[in-house]
Amino acid sequence: MLYLLGWKGRMEGGPPRAGAIPHGMPCWFDGQLKKRRVLAMLVCFADESGNLYTFTMACAISNDQKWLRLDREWKKSLAEFGVPYFHMKELVARKGPYCNWPQHRADAFIRKLVWVFQAHVMAWCATTVIIRDYYAVVKTDKNRKQRNPYYHAFQTCVGGALVFSSDQFKHSSLDSKVSFMLDAGGASQQRAAFYFAAFKELNGIPNERLGVLLFGNDEKINGLQAADLLAYEVHKHHQGFKRKSYLALRTLPHVDNLCNAKQLRDMFKDRPGLLL
């Protein structure tokens, strides 16, 4: 599966070792061990970006303590630039609180938020689906209903987060869980919850680590705003844009999947019953 691809990041030699912390990031893992906590919780905030041709879902992964630190620094950044929240779509269109912003102010705002993201997010994963290729390869399900690339991207990101969690805690006695939060204004909450529950039944993945799926307001929850930033940057990259902000995000451990026709055929040809 695509989510079994290796993690890429600053460290040489491929995926990070269990408990290893990328250069420049606080070593929270050893602190958790010293406290002998029974449960280690990773929280993943996810958001999407797309157009008629491509769809991206991105998931920012960190622990609860680091998310609290990000929340504080994110709020300071918003206050510094005089805006109540971050929403990339509004910033690009210069709508809402970003009305009449000059380009240099928008660029400085993005640089600041990317810095906060780098400092407090442990890793990220993203899947970009070429929509035309998806529907050419994946026809209909057993009920003759056409599938949605949203849920393929969502499940791939969930799998990537689980693999990262397994690597981080495989030599630990901690009982680790990975929980997820999506924007309540995004896709159908009922369908997303159904696919999340179905994902727990798949074989061959560390699904015992799955926690809960929650939904939140992206104007109030800064972790969702961080995921919005990530999803936009990944989507622009796969459209061919060369952005320094995306390159900065790539310094973190990450998996960035592009699902074209060949990859989709290779993934599903021997797995006809795989959830999409």
Image: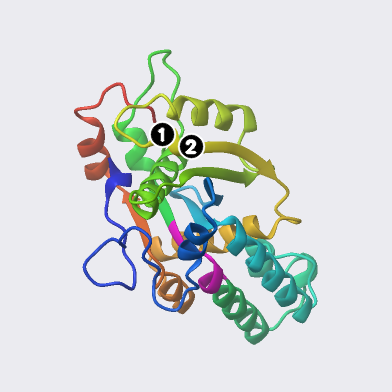
Q: Magenta segment, which residues?
A: 117-124
Q: How far across and how far down the image is residue 276, in percent? A: 39, 31
Q: Nearer the viewer, residue 81 or 133?
A: 81
Q: Is residue 89 left or right of residue 151?
A: right
Q: Is the residue under label 2 in contact with that under label 1 (CB below 8 Å)?
A: yes
Q: Nearer the viewer, residue 178 or 197?
A: 178
Mark 1 is on which residue type?
A: Asn
Res. 138 visible in picture: yes
Label drawn at residue 207: 1
Q: Residue at x 62, y 83 (%)?
A: 108
Q: Is residue 188 magenta?
A: no
Tag 2 residue? 210
Q: Residue at x 59, y 74 (%)?
A: 116
Mark 2 is on which residue type?
A: Leu
Q: How far across and how far down the image is residue 219, in percent? A: 74, 56
Q: How far across and how far down the image is residue 233, in percent? A: 49, 65
Q: Decide: few, some or many residues near mark 1? Use Cα within 10 Å; few <14, some 14-19, many ≥20.
A: some
Q: Decide: few, some or many residues near mark 2? Use Cα within 10 Å; few <14, some 14-19, many ≥20.
A: many
Residue 81 to residue 256: above or below? below
Q: Residue at x 39, y 77 (%)?
A: 23
Q: Is residue 240 left or right of residue 51?
A: left
Res. 149 visible in picture: no
**Mark 1 vs mark 2, CA separation in Å:** 5 Å
Q: How far across and how far down the image is residue 42, in percent? A: 52, 51
Q: Is residue 120 magenta?
A: yes
Numbered disc 2: secondary structure: strand
- Quarter assignment of residue 192: top right
Give the colour scheme of this rendering. Answer: rainbow
Numbered disc 1: secondary structure: helix
Q: How many marks?
A: 2
